[in-house]
Image (cartoon, rainbow, N blue to C red):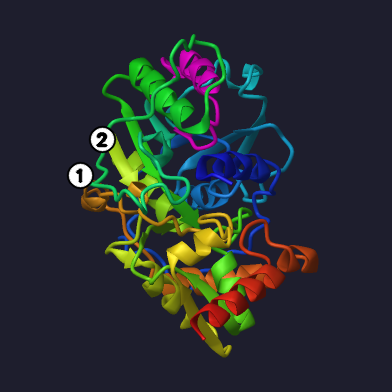
Amino acid sequence: MKRRDFLTGAGAATAGMALGAAPRFSMAQSAVSPVKPNPRKLLILGGTGFIGPPMVRYAVERGHEVTIFTRGRSRSDIPGVEHLVGDRSGDLNSLRGRTWDAVLDNNARDYRWVKLTTDLLRDKTEHYMFVSTISAYAGEATGYEYVDTPWTQPPITINSPLAQPPDGFQMGEELAYGPTKAMSEQIVESAFPGRTTIVRPGFIVGPGDPSDRFTYWPARIDQGGEVLAPGDGSDPVQIIDARDLTEWIVRLVEDSTYGIFNGVGIGSPLSMAEMVHGIRAVTSSQVKFTWVPVSFLRQHKVESYSDMPIWIPGDPMSSVDNSFAMKSGLTFRPLAVTAADTLAWHRTRPAEEQAELKIGIKPDREKQVLAAWHESVA
Protein backbone atom coordinates (compact mmCIF):
# COMPACT_ATOMS: atom_id res chain seq x y z
CA MET A 1 0.00 0.00 0.00
CA LYS A 2 1.35 3.40 -0.96
CA ARG A 3 1.29 6.44 1.28
CA ARG A 4 -0.92 8.43 -1.11
CA ASP A 5 -3.35 5.53 -1.49
CA PHE A 6 -3.61 5.15 2.26
CA LEU A 7 -4.03 8.87 2.86
CA THR A 8 -6.93 8.91 0.45
CA GLY A 9 -8.53 5.91 2.14
CA ALA A 10 -7.91 7.29 5.60
CA GLY A 11 -9.51 10.57 4.61
CA ALA A 12 -12.62 8.76 3.48
CA ALA A 13 -12.65 6.67 6.65
CA THR A 14 -12.72 9.74 8.90
CA ALA A 15 -15.70 11.33 7.19
CA GLY A 16 -18.30 9.57 9.32
CA MET A 17 -16.65 9.94 12.71
CA ALA A 18 -18.64 11.83 15.31
CA LEU A 19 -17.18 15.18 16.28
CA GLY A 20 -16.88 14.26 19.93
CA ALA A 21 -16.17 10.55 19.45
CA ALA A 22 -12.50 10.69 20.39
CA PRO A 23 -11.87 11.25 24.12
CA ARG A 24 -10.14 14.50 24.88
CA PHE A 25 -6.79 13.65 26.40
CA SER A 26 -4.85 16.63 27.68
CA MET A 27 -1.81 15.56 29.66
CA ALA A 28 -0.02 18.63 28.32
CA GLN A 29 -1.12 21.64 26.35
CA SER A 30 0.72 23.67 23.75
CA ALA A 31 3.01 26.38 25.07
CA VAL A 32 0.75 29.24 23.97
CA SER A 33 -0.29 32.42 25.71
CA PRO A 34 -3.67 32.02 27.46
CA VAL A 35 -4.72 35.48 26.26
CA LYS A 36 -7.66 35.04 23.91
CA PRO A 37 -7.82 36.95 20.63
CA ASN A 38 -10.68 39.04 19.35
CA PRO A 39 -13.49 36.67 18.35
CA ARG A 40 -13.89 35.92 14.66
CA LYS A 41 -16.51 34.19 12.52
CA LEU A 42 -14.96 30.97 11.22
CA LEU A 43 -16.29 28.51 8.66
CA ILE A 44 -14.66 25.09 8.93
CA LEU A 45 -15.17 22.89 5.90
CA GLY A 46 -15.22 19.51 7.56
CA GLY A 47 -15.02 19.32 11.31
CA THR A 48 -16.14 15.75 11.97
CA GLY A 49 -13.13 13.75 10.83
CA PHE A 50 -9.81 13.27 12.59
CA ILE A 51 -8.37 16.78 12.61
CA GLY A 52 -11.75 18.51 12.66
CA PRO A 53 -12.77 17.96 16.30
CA PRO A 54 -9.60 19.39 17.91
CA MET A 55 -9.70 22.32 15.48
CA VAL A 56 -13.33 23.11 16.30
CA ARG A 57 -12.87 22.64 20.01
CA TYR A 58 -9.80 24.87 20.18
CA ALA A 59 -11.45 27.59 18.10
CA VAL A 60 -14.47 27.62 20.41
CA GLU A 61 -12.22 27.73 23.48
CA ARG A 62 -10.49 30.75 21.98
CA GLY A 63 -13.83 32.54 21.77
CA HIS A 64 -14.53 32.27 18.04
CA GLU A 65 -17.95 31.85 16.43
CA VAL A 66 -17.67 28.54 14.61
CA THR A 67 -19.72 27.12 11.76
CA ILE A 68 -18.95 23.70 10.32
CA PHE A 69 -20.03 22.34 6.93
CA THR A 70 -20.35 18.58 6.48
CA ARG A 71 -22.54 15.97 4.83
CA GLY A 72 -24.49 15.62 8.07
CA ARG A 73 -23.52 12.06 8.91
CA SER A 74 -22.56 13.12 12.44
CA ARG A 75 -23.38 16.04 14.68
CA SER A 76 -21.32 18.38 16.82
CA ASP A 77 -21.56 17.94 20.59
CA ILE A 78 -19.80 21.25 21.29
CA PRO A 79 -22.25 23.91 22.48
CA GLY A 80 -22.66 26.91 20.22
CA VAL A 81 -21.27 25.32 17.04
CA GLU A 82 -23.48 25.91 14.00
CA HIS A 83 -23.71 22.89 11.70
CA LEU A 84 -24.53 23.40 8.03
CA VAL A 85 -25.23 20.37 5.85
CA GLY A 86 -24.37 19.90 2.20
CA ASP A 87 -21.96 18.20 -0.16
CA ARG A 88 -18.76 19.73 -1.50
CA SER A 89 -19.16 17.91 -4.78
CA GLY A 90 -22.16 20.05 -5.65
CA ASP A 91 -24.62 20.96 -2.88
CA LEU A 92 -23.34 24.22 -1.39
CA ASN A 93 -26.75 25.83 -0.91
CA SER A 94 -26.43 26.18 2.86
CA LEU A 95 -23.36 28.38 2.35
CA ARG A 96 -25.06 30.85 0.03
CA GLY A 97 -25.77 34.35 1.29
CA ARG A 98 -23.43 33.99 4.26
CA THR A 99 -20.16 35.71 5.17
CA TRP A 100 -17.29 34.72 7.43
CA ASP A 101 -14.01 36.29 8.53
CA ALA A 102 -12.07 33.18 7.54
CA VAL A 103 -12.59 29.76 5.96
CA LEU A 104 -10.60 26.73 7.17
CA ASP A 105 -10.66 24.04 4.50
CA ASN A 106 -9.46 20.79 6.06
CA ASN A 107 -11.27 18.08 4.10
CA ALA A 108 -10.68 18.79 0.39
CA ARG A 109 -9.79 15.51 -1.29
CA ASP A 110 -10.62 16.71 -4.82
CA TYR A 111 -9.51 19.88 -6.58
CA ARG A 112 -12.98 20.14 -8.13
CA TRP A 113 -14.47 20.56 -4.66
CA VAL A 114 -12.06 23.41 -4.03
CA LYS A 115 -13.01 25.11 -7.30
CA LEU A 116 -16.70 25.06 -6.40
CA THR A 117 -16.05 26.33 -2.88
CA THR A 118 -13.70 29.14 -3.80
CA ASP A 119 -15.94 30.31 -6.63
CA LEU A 120 -18.77 30.67 -4.12
CA LEU A 121 -16.80 32.16 -1.21
CA ARG A 122 -14.22 34.41 -2.88
CA ASP A 123 -16.23 37.53 -1.96
CA LYS A 124 -17.65 36.11 1.27
CA THR A 125 -14.51 35.85 3.38
CA GLU A 126 -11.22 37.67 3.84
CA HIS A 127 -8.98 34.69 4.55
CA TYR A 128 -8.83 31.17 3.11
CA MET A 129 -6.84 28.58 5.04
CA PHE A 130 -6.18 25.44 2.98
CA VAL A 131 -4.86 22.24 4.57
CA SER A 132 -2.81 20.54 1.87
CA THR A 133 -0.18 17.80 2.31
CA ILE A 134 3.51 17.12 1.77
CA SER A 135 2.30 14.58 -0.80
CA ALA A 136 1.76 17.65 -2.99
CA TYR A 137 5.54 17.72 -3.49
CA ALA A 138 7.14 15.90 -6.40
CA GLY A 139 9.44 12.94 -5.82
CA GLU A 140 7.72 11.17 -2.96
CA ALA A 141 8.94 7.70 -2.03
CA THR A 142 6.38 4.98 -1.41
CA GLY A 143 8.58 1.96 -0.74
CA TYR A 144 12.29 1.13 -0.95
CA GLU A 145 13.04 3.13 -4.09
CA TYR A 146 15.68 5.41 -2.51
CA VAL A 147 17.48 2.71 -0.53
CA ASP A 148 19.63 1.59 -3.45
CA THR A 149 19.88 5.06 -4.98
CA PRO A 150 19.97 7.43 -2.01
CA TRP A 151 18.12 10.71 -2.24
CA THR A 152 20.66 13.39 -3.06
CA GLN A 153 18.44 16.42 -3.65
CA PRO A 154 18.29 19.41 -1.26
CA PRO A 155 15.87 19.15 1.70
CA ILE A 156 12.19 19.58 0.95
CA THR A 157 11.20 23.19 1.59
CA ILE A 158 8.11 25.26 0.87
CA ASN A 159 9.70 26.19 -2.47
CA SER A 160 10.35 22.61 -3.64
CA PRO A 161 8.67 21.47 -6.89
CA LEU A 162 5.09 20.25 -6.64
CA ALA A 163 3.50 17.16 -8.15
CA GLN A 164 2.15 17.71 -11.64
CA PRO A 165 -0.87 16.27 -13.48
CA PRO A 166 -0.10 13.57 -16.04
CA ASP A 167 0.50 14.48 -19.68
CA GLY A 168 -2.72 15.15 -21.52
CA PHE A 169 -4.64 16.09 -18.37
CA GLN A 170 -7.76 18.20 -18.90
CA MET A 171 -9.40 20.31 -16.20
CA GLY A 172 -12.36 18.45 -14.78
CA GLU A 173 -10.71 15.06 -14.90
CA GLU A 174 -9.89 13.11 -11.75
CA LEU A 175 -6.41 13.44 -10.29
CA ALA A 176 -4.35 11.33 -7.88
CA TYR A 177 -4.03 12.51 -4.29
CA GLY A 178 -0.77 14.47 -4.52
CA PRO A 179 -1.51 16.28 -7.80
CA THR A 180 -5.08 17.06 -6.72
CA LYS A 181 -3.77 18.78 -3.59
CA ALA A 182 -1.19 20.72 -5.62
CA MET A 183 -3.90 21.77 -8.07
CA SER A 184 -6.15 22.78 -5.17
CA GLU A 185 -3.43 25.07 -3.83
CA GLN A 186 -3.25 26.85 -7.17
CA ILE A 187 -7.02 27.27 -7.27
CA VAL A 188 -7.11 28.76 -3.78
CA GLU A 189 -4.27 31.18 -4.46
CA SER A 190 -5.93 32.30 -7.70
CA ALA A 191 -9.27 32.94 -5.97
CA PHE A 192 -7.76 34.63 -2.89
CA PRO A 193 -4.56 36.36 -4.03
CA GLY A 194 -2.62 37.60 -1.03
CA ARG A 195 -5.27 36.24 1.34
CA THR A 196 -4.30 32.57 1.41
CA THR A 197 -2.60 30.35 3.96
CA ILE A 198 -1.49 26.90 2.85
CA VAL A 199 -0.37 24.28 5.36
CA ARG A 200 1.27 21.07 4.15
CA PRO A 201 1.21 18.43 6.92
CA GLY A 202 2.92 15.06 6.85
CA PHE A 203 1.95 12.17 9.15
CA ILE A 204 -0.74 13.51 11.50
CA VAL A 205 -1.00 11.37 14.64
CA GLY A 206 -2.56 11.22 18.06
CA PRO A 207 -5.75 10.12 19.83
CA GLY A 208 -8.70 9.67 17.50
CA ASP A 209 -6.66 8.73 14.43
CA PRO A 210 -8.62 6.04 12.56
CA SER A 211 -5.74 5.21 10.19
CA ASP A 212 -3.69 3.43 12.90
CA ARG A 213 -0.45 4.55 11.22
CA PHE A 214 1.11 5.78 14.46
CA THR A 215 -1.28 3.96 16.78
CA TYR A 216 0.26 0.65 15.67
CA TRP A 217 3.47 1.41 17.52
CA PRO A 218 2.08 2.33 20.99
CA ALA A 219 -0.40 -0.56 20.73
CA ARG A 220 2.24 -3.07 19.64
CA ILE A 221 4.87 -1.93 22.12
CA ASP A 222 2.33 -2.02 24.93
CA GLN A 223 1.67 -5.68 24.10
CA GLY A 224 5.28 -6.37 24.98
CA GLY A 225 7.54 -9.20 23.86
CA GLU A 226 9.89 -9.14 20.92
CA VAL A 227 9.03 -6.30 18.50
CA LEU A 228 10.19 -6.30 14.89
CA ALA A 229 11.85 -2.94 14.24
CA PRO A 230 12.89 -1.91 10.71
CA GLY A 231 16.38 -1.07 9.52
CA ASP A 232 19.06 0.05 11.91
CA GLY A 233 17.00 2.73 13.66
CA SER A 234 18.70 5.67 12.00
CA ASP A 235 16.07 6.44 9.35
CA PRO A 236 14.37 9.81 9.91
CA VAL A 237 10.66 10.00 10.62
CA GLN A 238 8.34 12.96 11.02
CA ILE A 239 5.05 13.01 12.91
CA ILE A 240 2.86 15.81 14.23
CA ASP A 241 0.19 15.58 16.90
CA ALA A 242 -3.18 16.57 15.44
CA ARG A 243 -3.75 18.91 18.36
CA ASP A 244 -0.48 20.75 17.77
CA LEU A 245 -1.29 21.08 14.07
CA THR A 246 -4.86 22.28 14.42
CA GLU A 247 -4.24 24.66 17.31
CA TRP A 248 -1.45 26.30 15.33
CA ILE A 249 -3.71 26.55 12.28
CA VAL A 250 -6.35 28.36 14.33
CA ARG A 251 -3.73 30.79 15.61
CA LEU A 252 -2.50 31.47 12.08
CA VAL A 253 -6.04 32.46 11.19
CA GLU A 254 -6.40 34.59 14.32
CA ASP A 255 -3.31 36.55 13.34
CA SER A 256 -4.21 36.72 9.61
CA THR A 257 -0.90 35.03 8.84
CA TYR A 258 -0.64 34.35 5.12
CA GLY A 259 1.85 32.20 3.23
CA ILE A 260 2.89 28.58 2.78
CA PHE A 261 4.02 26.36 5.66
CA ASN A 262 5.15 22.78 6.13
CA GLY A 263 3.08 21.57 9.07
CA VAL A 264 5.41 18.76 10.10
CA GLY A 265 7.04 17.81 13.37
CA ILE A 266 8.52 17.37 15.76
CA GLY A 267 10.68 20.32 16.72
CA SER A 268 13.98 18.50 16.21
CA PRO A 269 15.11 15.61 13.96
CA LEU A 270 13.65 12.27 15.05
CA SER A 271 14.97 8.83 14.12
CA MET A 272 12.96 5.64 14.00
CA ALA A 273 14.86 4.35 17.04
CA GLU A 274 14.16 7.51 19.01
CA MET A 275 10.48 7.25 18.14
CA VAL A 276 9.98 3.65 19.27
CA HIS A 277 12.08 4.10 22.40
CA GLY A 278 10.15 7.29 23.20
CA ILE A 279 6.94 5.30 22.92
CA ARG A 280 8.47 2.54 25.06
CA ALA A 281 8.81 5.07 27.88
CA VAL A 282 5.03 5.30 28.36
CA THR A 283 4.39 1.60 28.99
CA SER A 284 5.64 -0.79 31.66
CA SER A 285 5.49 -3.83 29.39
CA GLN A 286 8.59 -5.98 28.90
CA VAL A 287 9.79 -5.15 25.39
CA LYS A 288 12.71 -6.20 23.23
CA PHE A 289 13.31 -4.44 19.92
CA THR A 290 14.94 -6.53 17.21
CA TRP A 291 16.29 -4.36 14.39
CA VAL A 292 16.22 -6.19 11.07
CA PRO A 293 18.17 -4.86 8.04
CA VAL A 294 16.33 -3.40 5.09
CA SER A 295 17.74 -6.01 2.72
CA PHE A 296 16.29 -8.83 4.81
CA LEU A 297 12.91 -7.13 5.12
CA ARG A 298 12.76 -6.60 1.38
CA GLN A 299 13.71 -10.23 0.74
CA HIS A 300 10.88 -11.40 3.01
CA LYS A 301 8.39 -8.94 1.52
CA VAL A 302 7.97 -6.85 4.65
CA GLU A 303 6.69 -3.58 3.23
CA SER A 304 7.69 -0.17 4.44
CA TYR A 305 4.82 2.04 5.54
CA SER A 306 2.10 -0.63 5.41
CA ASP A 307 3.79 -3.42 7.45
CA MET A 308 6.10 -1.01 9.28
CA PRO A 309 3.96 2.14 9.66
CA ILE A 310 5.49 5.63 9.49
CA TRP A 311 8.83 4.16 8.32
CA ILE A 312 9.83 4.78 4.68
CA PRO A 313 13.62 4.37 4.35
CA GLY A 314 15.27 7.03 2.25
CA ASP A 315 12.03 8.95 1.71
CA PRO A 316 12.91 12.61 1.07
CA MET A 317 9.62 13.58 2.69
CA SER A 318 10.54 11.99 5.99
CA SER A 319 12.78 14.97 6.66
CA VAL A 320 10.92 18.10 5.55
CA ASP A 321 12.01 21.58 6.64
CA ASN A 322 9.57 23.10 9.14
CA SER A 323 11.61 26.10 10.25
CA PHE A 324 9.23 28.62 8.70
CA ALA A 325 6.29 27.05 10.53
CA MET A 326 8.12 27.09 13.85
CA LYS A 327 8.94 30.77 13.39
CA SER A 328 5.23 31.39 12.85
CA GLY A 329 4.33 29.81 16.21
CA LEU A 330 4.07 26.05 15.64
CA THR A 331 4.78 24.29 18.94
CA PHE A 332 4.90 20.62 19.88
CA ARG A 333 3.77 18.42 22.72
CA PRO A 334 6.41 15.96 23.92
CA LEU A 335 6.42 12.65 22.06
CA ALA A 336 5.67 10.88 25.33
CA VAL A 337 2.43 12.85 25.69
CA THR A 338 1.31 12.00 22.17
CA ALA A 339 2.18 8.32 22.70
CA ALA A 340 0.48 8.09 26.10
CA ASP A 341 -2.67 9.86 24.92
CA THR A 342 -2.84 7.72 21.79
CA LEU A 343 -2.49 4.54 23.84
CA ALA A 344 -5.10 5.70 26.34
CA TRP A 345 -7.52 6.44 23.48
CA HIS A 346 -6.76 3.11 21.82
CA ARG A 347 -7.75 1.29 25.00
CA THR A 348 -11.21 2.90 24.82
CA ARG A 349 -11.92 1.52 21.32
CA PRO A 350 -14.17 -1.48 20.70
CA ALA A 351 -12.37 -4.79 21.23
CA GLU A 352 -12.47 -5.66 17.54
CA GLU A 353 -10.74 -2.40 16.58
CA GLN A 354 -8.05 -2.96 19.18
CA ALA A 355 -7.47 -6.49 17.93
CA GLU A 356 -7.48 -5.71 14.20
CA LEU A 357 -5.58 -2.54 13.32
CA LYS A 358 -5.94 -1.16 9.82
CA ILE A 359 -2.20 -1.11 9.21
CA GLY A 360 0.93 -2.83 10.53
CA ILE A 361 2.37 -6.30 10.20
CA LYS A 362 0.12 -9.06 11.52
CA PRO A 363 1.27 -10.85 14.71
CA ASP A 364 1.79 -14.27 13.10
CA ARG A 365 3.69 -12.75 10.21
CA GLU A 366 5.88 -10.74 12.61
CA LYS A 367 6.81 -13.93 14.47
CA GLN A 368 7.66 -15.69 11.20
CA VAL A 369 9.97 -12.90 10.05
CA LEU A 370 11.68 -12.67 13.43
CA ALA A 371 12.24 -16.43 13.50
CA ALA A 372 13.69 -16.35 10.00
CA TRP A 373 16.01 -13.49 10.96
CA HIS A 374 17.29 -15.25 14.06
CA GLU A 375 17.89 -18.42 12.05
CA SER A 376 19.83 -16.46 9.42
CA VAL A 377 22.26 -15.02 11.97
CA ALA A 378 22.58 -18.13 14.15
* Residue 358 screen position, x and y as percent: 67, 56
Q: Residues within 10 Å of mark 2 (few under 14, many from 20)?
A: few
Which residue is labeled 1 in the image? 154
* Residue 152 screen position, x and y as percent: 23, 46
Residue 206 in sight: no
- Residue depicted at x 54% and y 11%: 172
- Residue depicted at x 59% and y 66%: 216
Nearer to me, 363 or 99: 363
Q: Is residue 35 above or below residue 180?
A: below
- In terms of image quadrants, where is residue 262? top left
* Residue 179 screen position, x and y as percent: 45, 27
What SS does tag 1 mark?
A: loop
Type of the residue with mark 1: Pro
Nearer to me, 157 or 167: 167
Query: Mark 1 touching mark 2, by CB under 8 A?
Result: yes
120 drawn magenta: yes
Type of the residue with mark 2: Ser
- Horizontal side of 236 relative to 340 (left or right) equals left
* Distance (Cα) linking label 1 and label 2: 9 Å
What SS does tag 2 mark?
A: loop
- Horizontal side of 188 relative to 371 (left or right) equals left
Q: Residues within 10 Å of mark 1 (few under 14, many from 20)?
A: few
Q: Is residue 193 above or below residue 375?
A: above
Q: Which residues, given as a range, are shown in magenta?
A: 104-126
**Label number found at residue 206:** none
- Horizontal side of 216 relative to 58 (left or right) equals right
**Label number found at residue 160:** 2
Residue 225 in sight: yes
- Residue depicted at x 68% and y 61%: 357
- In terms of image quadrants, where is residue 341? bottom right
Comes first in the chain, label 1 or label 2? 1
- Residue depicted at x 40% and y 34%: 136
